[in-house]
Amino acid sequence: MSYLIRGATLPDGTTTDLLLRDGVLAEGPADGAEVIDAEGLRVLPGLVDLHTHLRQPGREDAETIETGSRAAALGGYTAVCAMANTDPVADAAGIVEQVWRLGREVGLVDVQPVGAVTLGLGGERLAELGAMADSAARVRVFSDDGHCVHDAAVMRRALEYVKAFDGVIAQHAEDPKLTAGAQMNEGEQSARLGLTGWPAVAEEAIIARDALLAAHVGSRLHVCHVSTAGSVEVLRWAKSRGIRVTAEVTPHHLLLTDELAATYDPVYKVNPPLRTAEDVNALREALADGTIDAVATDHAPHTREDKECEWAAARPGMLGLETALPIVLRTMVETGLLDWAGVAERMSHAPARIAGLTGDGATGAHGRPLAAGEPANLVLVDPSASWTVTPEGLASISRNTPYAGLTLPGRVVATFLRGRATVLDGKAQA
Ligand SMILES: NC(=O)N[C@@H](CC(=O)O)C(=O)O
Ligand SMILES: [Zn+2]
């Protein structure tokens, strides 16, 4: 099947026709191609998510590779990095290969497994980083996400190890000694609500330490879900020193604040916690000026049982794949902080570069320019269509979206993975 997309607006604002044939953006006659009228639609390179929890294996009652892939395609993604905190943990070649293969079988999005840094996420013994890198899954990103690699010597060794194949350690920056028992952001709100606080310094201190370790080793560090104004300052300092550090921010940390904890609705419970309005503003500015490189969803599905209970017992985490682009449009584009080229950079090009997905690897190439000869991974967005989020309307098995009832801008009309429609007319194609 080939497609002729007529009159779509590119990230730079120019309008063009795009021919999708044999999996690539092609030139020449469009004979036999199905025509899609894209007048008024925006085209972006397929979005790439650095931080997705697909829950398979182990918690298929919350999400599966298939349902998560569908949610991703509907959100405009063509590649997602599947976090390693599954059961069993993705800490060996066999399991990352299995996740990668299952993703390919579903075929809606390229599922790029993230390998664990330490065995069983235990924080003590390094996992088989080299074997995972050499496996069919070609792992380049390693993370104990959900847990911080707290031992500085382990972190140092991991950074040294991945240098050989230009891998990156993605740190969940949280000093566990400072967050013991924490239920929400530490500040005025936690004092008022009487909940144990998660202080900003627990994140900032680890980022500073790891930036220094990355500098010492000369290796690549990536910081997951940055959430505080102080973290932005540390990142700015590290980048100004030429340290090889990149960072991501989630859509929810760009929009929501810790005042929502006053509802005691666990849908707002997440790690790191929602912070203050000042933090939100600093994160938006950092994403605009490139101090924060990428938007990552931290899509964290949880069952009703794990989420619809009292605050203290609820698991942290929010759905994100199907709402990420609309939240970025609301917080960054409508506010004039980013243009569409900036959205393409922060949601496709940069995450693909960080994850090592821009070249020809096991999962093909993502985050490439929309140019002839390049893989036809792209998304068509109707910027003028607004829609109201309903938990039942989402493709995820889980229902834990913090945006229920919210009306958001921007509807994904179609997503193409190597020239094949994974979403058409707003509907998933499998
Ligand atoms: N973000 C969360 O609150 N939860 C994540 C783990 C993580 O990303 O830290 C999860 O796996 O549920
Ligand atoms: Zn995390």
Image: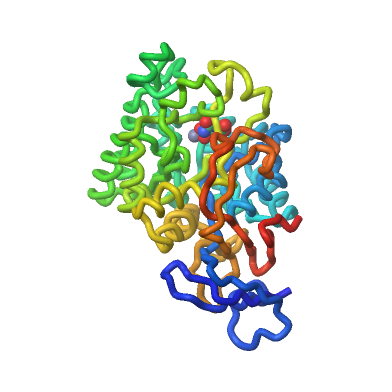
Q: Is residue 185 visible?
A: yes
- Label count reads 0
Position of 247 with respect to 402 (left or right) is left
**Quarter of the picture holding the C terminus:** bottom right
- The image shows residue 235, relative to residue 111, as above or below, that is above
Q: Residue at x 43, y 39 (%)?
A: 255
- Height in image: 43 above or below 79? below
The residue drawn where x is 48% and y is 46% is 327
- Image position of 206 (left or right of 120): left
Tell me the quarter of the picture where residue 215 sits.
top left
Q: Position of residue 237 (x, y in %)?
A: 24, 44
Q: How are the residues colored?
A: rainbow
Please provide percent x and percent y for residue 104: 70, 55
Residue at image position (52%, 43%) is 297
Comparing 33 with 409, the one in front is: 409
Q: Position of residue 388 (x, y in %)?
A: 59, 44
Left or right, residue 166 beside residue 395: left
Question: Toward the viewer: 140 or 7?
Answer: 7
Quadrant (top left/top right/bottom left/bottom right) for the N terminus = bottom right
Q: Nearer the viewer, residue 48 or 392?
A: 392
In the image, taking residue 293 as reference, residue 79 lies left or right, namely: right
Where residue 53 sits, quadrant-wise, is: top right
Q: Residue at x 41, y 47 (%)?
A: 331
Quadrant of residue 421 in the image? Answer: bottom right
In this view of the protein, can residue 94 be seen by the observer?
A: no
Residue 84 in percent (x, y) is at 58, 38
The outermost residue toward the bottom is 29
